[in-house]
Image (spheres, helix red, strand yellow):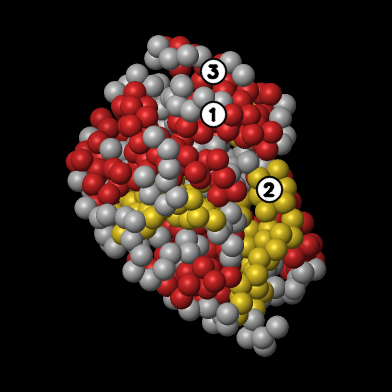
Amino acid sequence: MSARTKTFAAVDLGASSGRVMVGRVGPGTLDLTEAHRFPNRPVRLPEGLRWDVLGLYRGVLDGLRAAGPVDSVGVDSWAVDYGLLDADGALLGNPVHYRDDRTRGAAEQVWNTVPPHELYRATGIQYAPFNTLYQLAAARGTVQLRSAERLLLIPDLISHWLTGEQGTEITNASTTQLVDPRTRDWDRSLADRLGVDLGLFAPLRHPGDPAGTLLPHVREATGLGPVPVTAVASHDTASAVAAVPAARGERFAYLCTGTWSLAGLELDAPVTTEASRAANFTNELGVDGTVRFLRNIMGLWLLQECMREWGEDDVGPLLARAAEAPALRSVVDAAAEDFLAPGSMPARIAAACRAAGQPSPATRGEITRCVLDSLALAHRRAVRDAQRLADRAVDVVHVVGGGARNALLCQLTADACGLPVVAGPAEAAALGNALVQARAHGAAGDLAATRELLARSRPSARYEPSGDRAAWDSAARRVEDGRGA
């Protein structure tokens, strides 16, 4: 191993599981291994759905202990959710889960002050009922929010517990719907109009910035020394996009797949047109001044919820049955809010098909095929809309994240989009996390150089489009005309 190779612990917290990965990065070297993986199980309390953030933190500590000696630690997670701290720095209750229903009607409260078109023009953030801004509107007047002295987004909260330092990393901050994507700073005028106290937020920091050093009790718990914590692209999608192994100058779309599917383009500037707002595209900030212009799609959450209902742990047999099921027989709108909440997913999918006058999928294989066909159609629509709205053509779709392992979904996405799909890496968020740390500590080059390193060192699979284009066109019309959901 080269003397210049360094080791980084990438804490990557997803909506269904967390992991601590160990990345070793140096000249021509990129290796990633799993130190520890642990479940992320939300808890239903009388007051609503909450994250077990203490359980997650325990998993982080266990993972850092298993990782062994490292040169730096970085933390990324899902977006929008947060913890509140009181004046003594104590956590004020478990963070609310974004799938909790407390934000019902909150968007309308915000829009009464700032109409949706003004809000989008200012922030470029798509409408989603769980956006941080709407969560804050729903929490207005509560004892917790009145008692809060600090609001920390989930990865910043974990970093704070590791170091005692506080900051708000910019890629995740951009998802709050309170940041101007052009200035890459808080939109103070907007916050004032909406009565949001930006003093609740810690100072902004950027990928690569120092985020503190492990506290003594953390060192004792993990067996590590005074290791620095480095701010990474702390929104897991920002880390995943940084790990897209695109060639220099390649015209690509990306698809980050997992519980969610995030499909779009990497741009130099936001697109905040009315057409973009109508298409519900978001402009989230990425590394090196980039903008992630994308649409959120419900993703493999639909299949995960079906598997939970069925008591299935192994997706392999389901995919085998789905491959044998009739193609495009029944499709739904995979981005529909009807599928946001947990519970009874197979029944809801079947009901949506019946309501649309389509055959109701009955077997597990048929339901799985309906989910995958519907996701492929949603991916197609997002990729096509992104090209139109940003006036930028693409030649290839890079699929990263857990869905890159799903060969059937990748092939269906290629067929639906009519574009080749390059799948991999599956652990994109952890790789992007480790590579940002490596750049900050002199073990890797710029974004283009790290992508070249990824392409050379990580396996990928290529899927060429095939199948009946007319059948995909017909199924897309069923969904887009409102008959498929």
Q: Considering depth in this image, is 475 or 37 the residue closer to the camera?
A: 475
Q: Based on the displayed image, in which of its 4 quarters is residue 10 positioned?
A: bottom right
Quadrant into which the C terminus falls: top left
Residue that carries the numbered disc 1 in the rendered image: 369
Residue drawn where x is 70% and y is 63% of the image:
33
* Among numbered discs 3 and 2, the one appearing first in the sequence: 2
* Among numbered discs 3 and 1, the one appearing first in the sequence: 3
Residue drawn where x is 46% and y is 22% of the image:
329
Q: Considering depth in this image, is 256 or 18 the residue closer to the camera?
A: 256
Across and down, in percent, residue 391 comes to: 21, 53
- Specify whether residue 129 is in view: no
Task: Categorize mark 1 by other alpha carbons within 10 Å: few (<14), some (14-19), many (20+).
Answer: many
Amino acid under label 3? Pro
* Among numbered discs 2 and 1, the one appearing first in the sequence: 2
Residue drawn where x is 38% and y is 21% of the image:
484
Residue that carries the numbered disc 3 in the rendered image: 361
- Between the C-alphas of marks 3 and 2, the distance is 37 Å
Amino acid under label 2? Leu
Amino acid under label 1? Arg
Q: Is residue 178 left or right of residue 303?
A: left
User: Would you place residue 250 above or below residue 293 in this image?
Assistant: below
Residue that carries the numbered disc 2 in the rendered image: 56
Across and down, in percent, residue 436 comes to: 52, 69
